[in-house]
């Protein structure tokens, strides 16, 4: 019986490996992503973020460009974090809230934004914010009920986007322990 299981495992493994495109499992050092032209509109680092307006969890409009140009203290950076409110997301948000935010509290003006793309409404976003303990926190929580921003920046669960005060995207990647976020903020904040 053990040899039958081994044969089934080996066959399944070969089938899975055969499904990997042309069967070439040797990675190359060629970057196959499309070239990005700095200063063009988009979501990739070095591109200019496309302006957006979403409602926060209290129903107030949040427009990206207003935070760079308006108010007494324009933002040096905006950090967007895309959440599903799952345990992984909340651990990322907790790490950001308790480790990253305090590190930069006296360095410039940074807006930390949680983007809820799963609750489906402002009321649902507010309920999720409160149920997960983020009401009154350093985060502004936005309701992306139609996944407009989610699609605009090519996000997925845990995507973290940093936009500097000029509107340039500095980072767009999955949250991986906060090291890249910290390094990026260190490069932009006074």
Image (cartoon, rainbow, N blue to C red):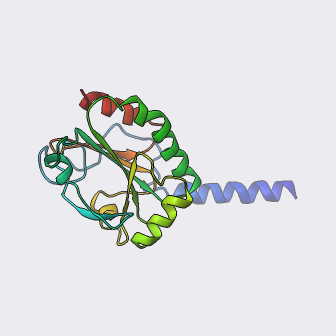
Query: Measured from the top left, where is residue 160 in percent x and y?
Result: 37, 47
Quarter of the image for the N terminus: give it.
bottom right
Query: Measured from the top left, where is residue 72 in percent x and y?
Result: 17, 43
> Which residue: 53% across, 50% down?
90
Which image quadrant is residue 138 in? top left
Q: Is residue 165 visible?
A: yes
Which residue occupies the extreme right position in the image?
1
Question: Viewer-proximal residue, 58 or 172?
Answer: 58
Q: Is residue 123 above or below residue 70?
A: below
> Which residue: 11% across, 46% down?
39
Question: Viewer-proximal residue, 19 or 160?
Answer: 160
Query: Measured from the top left, where is residue 180 in percent x and y?
Result: 38, 34
Task: Name the side, left or right, on which 88 lies relative to 37.
Answer: right
Quarter of the image for the C terminus: give it.
top left
Task: Name the side, left or right, on which 98 lies relative to 39.
Answer: right
Query: Measured from the top left, where is residue 68 in percent x and y?
Result: 17, 46
Question: Viewer-proximal residue, 59 or 77?
Answer: 59
Which image quadrant is residue 21 in? bottom left
Task: Name the side, left or right, on which 29 lies relative to 65.
Answer: right
Q: Is residue 119 visible?
A: no
> Which residue: 19% across, 40% down?
73
Q: Is residue 68 above or below residue 116?
A: above
Task: Name the side, left or right, on which 97 lies relative to 15.
Answer: left
> Which residue: 15% across, 49% down?
70
């Amino acid at each position: 019986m053990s040899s039958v299981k081994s044969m089934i495992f080996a066959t399944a493994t070969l089938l899975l490996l055969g499904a990997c495109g042309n069967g070439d499992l040797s990675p190359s050092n060629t970057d196959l992503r499309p070239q990005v032209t700095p200063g063009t509109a988009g979501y990739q680092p070095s591109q200019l973020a496309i302006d957006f307006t979403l409602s926060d969890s209290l129903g107030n409009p949040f427009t990206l460009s207003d935070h760079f140009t308006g108010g007494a203290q324009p933002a040096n950076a905006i950090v967007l974090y895309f959440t599903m409110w799952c345990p992984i997301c909340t651990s990322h948000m907790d790490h950001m809230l308790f480790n990253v935010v305090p590190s930069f509290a006296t360095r410039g003006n940074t807006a930390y934004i949680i983007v809820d793309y799963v609750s489906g409404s402002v009321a649902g976003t507010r309920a999720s914010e409160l149920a997960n303990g983020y009401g009154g926190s350093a985060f502004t929580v936005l309701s992306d009920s139609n996944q407009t921003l989610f699609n605009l920046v090519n996000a997925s669960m845990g995507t973290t986007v940093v936009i500097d005060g000029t509107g340039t995207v500095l980072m767009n990647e999955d949250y991986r322990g906060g090291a890249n976020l910290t390094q990026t903020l260190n490069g932009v904040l006074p």
